[in-house]
Amino acid sequence: MPARDIYHNTVVEALKTDAWTITHYPLYLGYGGQHLYVDLGAEKTAIAAEKNDQKIAV
């Protein structure tokens, strides 16, 4: 696993402030027999419409 750089915590806090959810620390990707690590994974829910228990997003 790679070491985090000096900007890691600043980026994490900026994403959280902008309503992103951090999902992975780090994000692991396996591809073609290689092991790749991305510093972190994040997602932001974009709900376009909601009705009862149904949600749609674009």
Image (cartoon, rainbow, N blue to C red):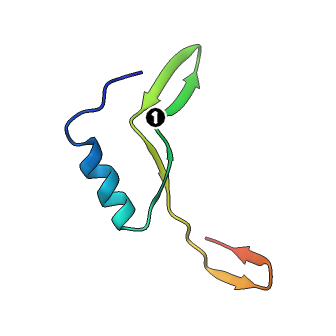
Between residue 18 and residue 29, name the one nearer to us: 18
Q: Residue at x 19, y 37 (%)?
A: 6
- The residue singled out by tag 1 in the image is 26
Rendering coords of residue 25 (x, y %):
46, 38
Left or right, 52 with reference to 4? right
Left or right, 36 with reference to 48? left
Q: Amino acid at mark 1?
A: Pro
Judge whether 6 appears above or below 11 on screen.
Answer: above
Provide the secondary structure element on which disc 1 rests.
Answer: loop
Rendering coords of residue 32 (x, y %):
59, 17
- Name of the residue lying farthest toward the bottom: 51
Q: Residue at x 56, y 67 (%)?
A: 45
Q: Quadrant of the N terminus?
A: top left
Mark 1: give few (<14), some (14-19) or many (20+) Cα within 10 Å.
some
Q: Residue at x 44, y 61 (%)?
A: 20
Judge whether 46 appears above or below 1 on screen.
Answer: below
